[in-house]
Amino acid sequence: MQDESCYLCGHITEDILHVLRNRSYAKEIWHQVIPPNHIRRFFAGNISNWLISNLQVNKANNLSDSDWTCFFGIILWHIWKNRNLYIFQGKAMNSKEVIRVLYCWAKHFTSIHNKALKINTWLI
Ligand SMILES: [Zn+2]
């Protein structure tokens, strides 16, 4: 039987929610971009609700506007890429350096669409 535990931290299962949201590296990333008053809600819920609430455009929620959906998607991609980089090449990236790069990518992507990037971040 295949070992389903997390290669990186030993968690009993390495499901997608563990990799993208709940593992320590992912948490370090999210804590840099999620305002403290939204942290509890951000880390609640299953994968489906979590993705939908962050990827849908909802102007009533500052964290779910179109700029956030872009930044959120780029962060997800990075977290997955970083996991694979560590597993297959033994390399890891610093979460504080990474978030600045990802912010620039989101800003560049958004500027292509002639929009100002308005993202709540705490260290940028
Ligand atoms: Zn893990």
Image (cartoon, helix red, strand yellow):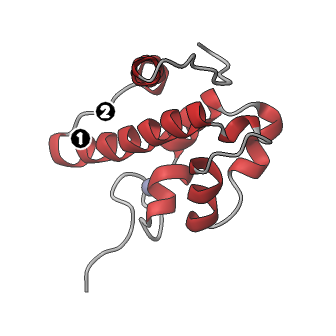
Report the amino acid beneath label 1.
Leu
Name the element at disc 1.
helix
Q: Name the residue under label 1.
A: 85
How many marks on residues?
A: 2
Query: Taking 100 as reference, is 82 above or below it?
Result: below
Res 62 → quadrant:
top right
Residue depicted at x 57% and y 31%: 67
Q: Dot 2: within a 10 Å radius of its alpha carbon, few (fewer than 14), some, or many (20 or more) residues?
A: some
Residue depicted at x 57% and y 41%: 27
Return the residue nearer the eye: 114 or 97: 114
Name the element at disc 2.
loop
Q: Name the residue under label 2.
A: 92
Decide if residue 30 is on the left or right side of residue 19: right
Q: Quadrant of the N terminus?
A: bottom left
Decide if residue 85 is on the left or right side of residue 77: left
Return the residue nearer the eye: 23 or 51: 51
Q: Where is residue 123 in the image (x, y as percent from the top left)?
A: 62, 15
Q: Position of residue 75 (x, y in %)?
A: 45, 37
Ligand 1 visible in quadrant: bottom left
